[in-house]
Image: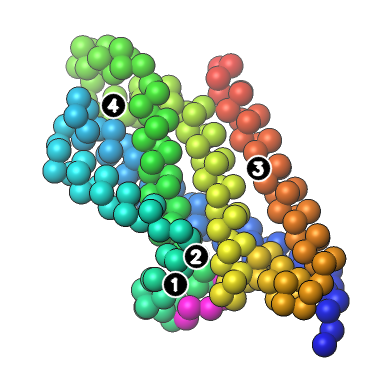
Amino acid sequence: MNNAITSDQVIQAIQETLQMVSISLLVGALIGIPLGLLLVLTRKGGILKNSAIFSVLNNIINIVRSLPFIILLVAIVPFTKFIVGSSIGTNAAIVPLIVYIAPYIARLVENSVLEVDQGIVEAAEAMGATPLQIIWHFILPEALSSLILSLTTATIGLIGATAMAGTVGGGGIGDLAISYGYERFNTVVIVITVIILIILVQGIQTLGNVLARKIRRQ
């Protein structure tokens, strides 16, 4: 059995990981950000207070977030097959990644928005701003720096999840580490994948910190 890996395999694994992370983050953010805002707006004391909506959303998010990703990955296999026609491969891994990251982003967005000074919202209401105007012109600009850091955290969490997706043939760096490192006892492959993951995480965290710092200075 050949334990060696080529540079092409490493590059392909990185590309698959970036594909999974980028698509899952984009779709997850499109779902999670509105959910997070709804949690804030419909909670007790929110500008759109609605205990029924808040309770349903809050419970659903808590339920999904209570499942470790590896269990969620297996639990929604039928749903994944229904969506993409397979439970193996990069495209199949994206489905559970979205299900995993959307409520995570929602909770992060909720925390970021709750940090906004309530006085700003009250001032906007006093000026006659509509709920949509309050969200777009007051809440989001004030929370933008924190939201960037939240999405940075979510991205790093996704990278870790994609590595776990490799245990079921999800492709990417995790699959490379499992197939060529763990199963074939190739320590070099494990070291290579660890270094790649560290570089990715450090790069994303640095970028997020820089962007958030620039926003705060504006």
Where is residue 6 shown, x and y percent of the image? 84, 73
Q: Name the residue type under label 4.
A: Gln
Q: Main secondary structure of the magenta part?
A: loop
Callout 2 secondary element: helix
Categorize mark 4 by other alpha carbons within 10 Å: few (<14), some (14-19), many (20+). few
- Give the residue at mark 1: 74
Note whether 82 is above or below 160 in the view shown: below
Q: In the figure, residue 84 lies in which quadrant?
A: bottom left
Query: Along the line of sight, which residue is nearer the eye, 60 or 106?
Result: 60
Please give the label number shown on residue 133: 4
Q: Are marks 2 and 4 in contact (CB under 8 Å)?
A: no
- Give the residue at mark 2: 70
Note whether 159 is above or below 204 in the view shown: below
**Quadrant of the drawing holding the C terminus:** top right
How far is disc 2 from disc 4 in space, using C-alphas? 40 Å
Q: Name the residue type under label 3.
A: Ile
Where is residue 120 shown, x and y percent of the image? 32, 15
Q: Name the residue type under label 2.
A: Ile
Span of residues in magenta: 86-90
Callout 1 secondary element: helix
Q: Residue at x 45, y 66 (%)?
A: 71
Where is residue 178 shown, x and y percent of the image? 68, 71
Callout 3 secondary element: helix
Please give the label number shown on residue 204: 3
